[in-house]
Amino acid sequence: MPNKRTDNNDRQTHNATLQQQNDEAFINELYDAVSQESQSQPSELLDQRIINAAHKAVNTSNKPKGNNKFKWYSSLATAASLTLVISLVVLQQSNILPNEQANNMLKQGVVLQKPMASTSDNESIADQEVVVEQIDYQAQVGYSAMPSQVENASATTTKMSNTIKIAAEEKMVRATQYEKKAQLIKPQTAERMMAASPMIMTRFNKIEQGKAQEDRAEIIDLSIEQLKQYKRSNKALDTQNKWLWSFSSENHIEYIIHIFNDNHAPLEYRLDKNTFKVMGLSKRDLEKSPLNNKSLSKIIILNTKD
Amino acid sequence: MNQVALPAEHSKGSVTDEALMLAYGKGQASAFDLLYQRHKQVVFRFFVKQGLSLAVAEELCHDTWLKIINAREQYQPQALFRTYLFTIARNTLLDHYKKKSTQNEVNHTNNYTDNNSGNEESITDVNHNGLSEKIATPSIYEEQQKEQLQIALSLNIAALPIAQREVFLLKQESGFSLEQIAQITAQHQEKVKSSWRYALKRLRKGLQHYAK
């Protein structure tokens, strides 16, 4: 049975092949009968169009020197542009804008509160000093940055809720708190330093002494005798013409005051704290001292050995 | 223009198509002239025999050669240039069909008959009857017979399905082997063989009146 099937298949294949060969022969005969001259050809216009296009393409690409020059210039221009852009980006990153810096400082301010709160008296005073300076700076920069932030926020978030404004206000309040803290902490720092670390204090004294020496050439030291003389002279003068003084500044070693009467220009004196004590100086006096002239009796002599 | 001298055998036609195309890719414009002269007719006939009008056939021909021109620098002689040429021609034709969304264009022999849209019986009858009605001297009669045969052949080829028609034209008109056609059309060789067989059968049926 399988042999019969195979035979049938072979016969069918053979017949198909024969049929195909006949068909091919038939078509070939017809093709031979058709005149070759009558076979269609493309028009001369088409020939011309194609050949012109071919020649034009070659002519265009046969100007490589000009193109190469252009490529050379363009690559150079690209390289120069890239260098410029990169340098601008680097410059911008190295010089951060004030607003961005302020934002960064404000963000850091939250972190800086924690070490302050946990600082005990035994901890490093130098760290406290750094913190004080940072908070002071934040307060200054924060104030300058806040208005622009608030403006920007209000301009861009007119359709948004008030949450952004509230956040901005909170930042403003925080910045104010930093400033107040800085004012409170700063005067106490020197005293704490004295109590905490003699080494730091020594260094601090040296710095202060250095500063004082710079001013020493211009400011006169007030001696006990001179003060006594002023006081004696004052007793003889009328109330209106009495010699008065005003507070200028103070550090932990000395006071700087101005002594003057109506007719003369004020004289600047340095009062050693070991020898003199200036009474009645309040915070208000420190701020408004140049306008508040005081009696010489407020200056007390501590050490008569001078 | 870059006038590089062609090899001595250039004019004799012994330079291969591939060498000519490479020379053209390097800027030798005259190489293209020769290449075009060799193949312009087969490419044109390939389009005309698809049943397209002469204008459309010329347009497709132009597009095909432009593609060859534009790709001259990327040409790699991995196969025969003719295979490469007809692959591009076929793709151009398929693009045309996609654009027009039609498979049968108006035949350029439409002047002779309005019945040319695929009805094989009517094509055969009209041609055969038209031929028998004519009264002429023997020489004129032969000429007219050839003319009628060519028209009938073109009409019957145009009436073939696309797959069979392209296989038939590539083999019969352009002289490609079935293997090369499979390469051009990106089809399996058995499918190409089958298309060829059906095309022959169909054409024979349509043109049986012309059997001697």
Image: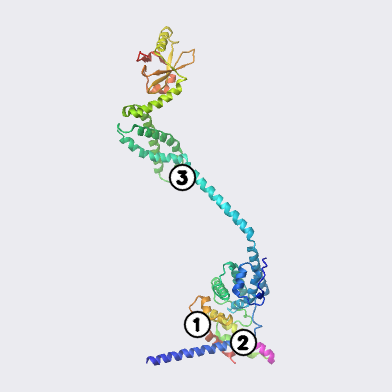
Disc 1 and disc 3 in contact, CB within 8 angstroms: no
Q: Residue at x 63, y 61 (%)?
A: A64
Please indicate whether residue A192 sits to the left or right of residue B31 in the image: left
Would residue A176 be visible to someone looking at this image? no
Image coords of residue A71 (percent x, y): 59, 56
The CA distance from mark 1 to mark 2 is 23 Å
Relative vertical location of residue A281 with respect to residue A93 in this rendering, above or below: above
Q: Give the letter of the chain under mark 1.
A: B
User: Amino acid under label 3?
Assistant: Thr
Position of the C terminus of chain A, as image quadrant, is top left
Image coords of residue B94 (percent x, y): 54, 73
- Badge 2 crowding class, 10 Å Cα cut-off, few under 14, some 14 to 19, many 20 or more, is few
Element carrying mark 3: helix
The CA distance from mark 3 to mark 2 is 85 Å
Q: Which residues are magenta?
A: B136-146
Please tell me if label 1 and label 3 are on a single chain: no
| Magenta: main secondary structure | helix
- Mark earlier in primary sequence (3, 2): 2
- Residue linked to disc 2: A32
User: Amino acid under label 2?
Assistant: Asp
Would residue A59 be visible to someone looking at this image? yes
Element carrying mark 1: helix
- Badge 1 crowding class, 10 Å Cα cut-off, few under 14, some 14 to 19, many 20 or more, is some
- Residue linked to disc 1: B193
Q: Which mark is residue A156?
A: 3
Image coords of residue B125 (percent x, y): 58, 88
Q: Residue at x 64, y 79 (%)?
A: A40
